[in-house]
């Protein structure tokens, strides 16, 4: 089964972008996933193809129109009726690795990219759209966030990463940040690779890695640490 991605955007030329190279690009060539873009402006019925209007109640910027967005979503849904629609917005629920795994295990995803001041709120009342955030930052549009989300999904698809176990010990997979890595040379500018990693004792290495994951998570991400301890 090919993972199908459809991106609803005012800037389809931004895709595949970085997803056309490296692991994702090779997987695209191998048809492990597919990409389709829909130009939101094509679904405006006005003479000037207007997709946005000034905010009700006043204020700066422009707001994407609910009727235009709905027409685009409806068309996308006919193409991928069993795929969820995600809107990239800082007002959304922060994306997690577990949610990425759920998406990657499914048939695909439709991603709605915002611009300007965002979406008319009524689109979330009139259509089944999941609001997603990639962090407490504001981007110029949803496209960079969509690229990030798709990359996170694509790398988990069967056959994309070299070894099936490549992603199992990474940050967030076990509820912790990943342990630090080292490679040759054994010493660099006075800093040496920890002796335990050169010992050949796999049990000690595993214990060291687990300890470092816990220490780094506790120090750097106390929110993750508290959740990990609860679970």
Image: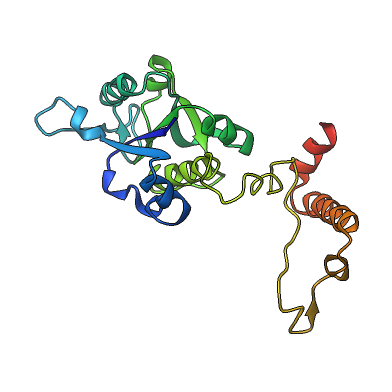
Instruction: Name the image quarter holding the N terminus.
Output: top left
Residue 5 percent coordinates (x, y): 39, 35
Which residue is painted at 66% across and 45% down in the image?
165
The residue shown at (62%, 38%) is: 97
The colour scheme applied to this rendered structure is rainbow
> Within the image, what quadrant is residue 28 found in?
top left
Closer to the camera in the image, 40 or 92: 40
Which residue is the extreme one toward the top? 126
The location of residue 150, given as percent across then percent down, is: 46, 42
Q: Nearer the viewer, residue 206 or 123?
A: 206
Pick the residue in front: 34 or 190: 34
Q: Residue at x 38, y 15 (%)?
A: 126
Vertical placement of 107 versus 205: above or below?
Answer: above
Residue 91 seen in render: no
> How many numbered dots are placed on residues in this image?
0
Instruction: Please say whether residue 203 is visible from this viewpoint.
Output: yes
Name the quadrant of the C terminus.
Answer: top right
């Amino acid at each position: 089964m090919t993972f199908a991605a459809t991106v609803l955007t005012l800037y389809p030329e931004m895709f595949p972008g970085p997803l056309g190279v490296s692991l994702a690009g090779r997987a695209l060539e191998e048809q492990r996933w597919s990409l389709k873009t829909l130009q939101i402006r094509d679904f405006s019925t006005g003479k000037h193809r207007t997709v946005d209007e000034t905010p009700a109640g006043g204020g700066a910027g422009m707001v994407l129109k609910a009727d235009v967005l709905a027409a685009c979503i409806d068309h996308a849904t006919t193409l991928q009726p069993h795929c969820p629609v995600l809107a990239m917005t800082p007002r959304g629920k922060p994306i997690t690795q577990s949610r990425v795994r759920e998406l990657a295990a499914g048939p695909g995803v439709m991603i709605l990219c915002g611009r300007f001041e965002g979406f008319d709120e009524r689109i979330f009342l009139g259509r089944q759209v999941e609001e997603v955030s990639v962090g407490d930052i504001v981007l110029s549009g949803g496209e960079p966030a969509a690229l990030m989300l798709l990359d996170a999904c694509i790398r988990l698809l069967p056959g994309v990463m070299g070894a099936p176990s490549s992603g199992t010990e990474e940050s967030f997979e076990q509820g912790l940040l990943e342990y630090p890595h080292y490679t040759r040379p054994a010493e660099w500018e006075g800093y040496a690779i920890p002796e335990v990693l050169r010992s050949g004792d796999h049990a000690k290495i595993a214990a060291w890695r687990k300890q470092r994951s816990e220490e780094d998570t506790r120090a750097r991400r106390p929110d993750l640490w508290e959740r990990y301890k609860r679970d």
